[in-house]
Image (cartoon, grey):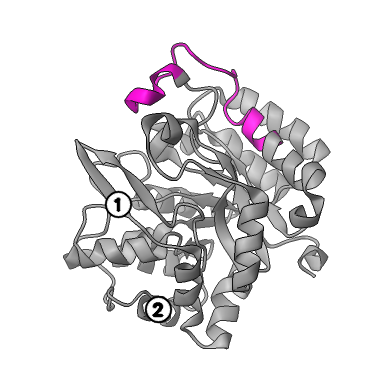
Amino acid sequence: MIDCHNHVGTDLLFYLHGDFPYAQHLVAMHDEGRALGVDRWIVFPFVSHLALDVTVFMDNKIKDEKGRLHDVPYAFENRRLLKEINVMFPEEGKHMLPFVMVDPMRNVAAQAKELRKLRADYRFYGIKLQTTILQANIKHLNDRGKVFLELAAEWDLPFLIHSSVAESDIWAQASNILDIAEANPHLRFCLAHSCRYDKECLDRVNALPNTWFDCSAHCIHCEGAVKDLPYIAPKARRFDSDFTNPGRVIADLAAAYPHKFMWGSDSPFYSYAGEINGQVVRLISTYKAEVAALKASPPDVVQRIANTNTRNLLKLHDESILS
């Protein structure tokens, strides 16, 4: 079983603003997941990076002007993760498939230079973007962030991209990600969070030859659908299933999109708690619940969505690392 979506490290924005989760240790994730039957993990750093102004994180603001602890987005975070995997905890690390994080808007030339240096020292297997928190429009992959498309082509790496359908989220619209994928048929893309159950986007993922989707943070997304919360596609566009039963939803998605659906927990973001507009929001799940929803399907379905489809996205040059 491959869990295709996991964060390792810490997020200063979430910690300083008082949000949860704000950290995950590699060994703790490995040990908890291993006990549940997970064998491999695609991992990447948390989202906020040290090239942002950390002095305004307590106010939940994203600024670039001052207060940076590093000049290059994710240069520290990516190398820190790969050192943790390869040097500090190599026994657990050998079960990891690390992706690097990138910011498509800020100091991209320096990011590309750092990635080339990192590539000379360590292996990584994909590129991850979460542009909502960074307030960096994913469409920058078409212009100032185009170098990341070029690196993905050069190294034959897939993208895993946070997706949204909420009107207020102008930075990570699933439709924009799909436009980028359609314009770059030589590259592979996975859209996270089941495109928030937007059937039009899911159908488009199914139609394109170079796109997949994952179900990261599945249980709290099902809860959002039941409560009709704004981060989920509205009912008129929503994939039809019984969202009171996360296992049923996984089975229905696997039947509708048999070769495009990948399972991932989004650990530790299978839960979220924070204060939004003066109100405390709590969306709570567990790693155990995410795995239980997956294993409610027959073994052949589990194998397909938690192994085969993920390997098709990865297209590993040496699959012996999975043995």
Secondary-structure class at tag 1:
strand
Q: Is residue 176 magenta?
A: no
Q: Residues within 10 Å of mark 1 (few under 14, many from 20)?
A: few
In terms of sequence position, does the residue under pointer 2 or pointer 1 come before the other?
2
Q: Quadrant of the C terminus?
A: bottom right
| Image: magenta residue range | 55-79
- Kindly report the secondary structure that dominates the magenta region of the rendered protein: loop
Asked if residue 201 shows in the view, the reply is: no
Q: Which residue is mark 2?
A: 247
Q: Is residue 71 magenta?
A: yes
Q: Is residue 221 above or below residue 53?
A: below
Residue most extreme to the top: 66
Q: Is residue 71 above or below residue 314?
A: above
Q: For residue 163, which numbered disc appears in the image? A: none
Question: Percent x, y for residue 243?
Answer: 28, 73
Q: For residue 282, which numbered disc appears in the image? A: 1
The amino acid type of the residue labelled 1 equals: Arg
| Front residue (pair 113, 143) | 113
Image-quadrant location for residue 121: top right
Q: Is residue 134 above or below residue 314?
A: above
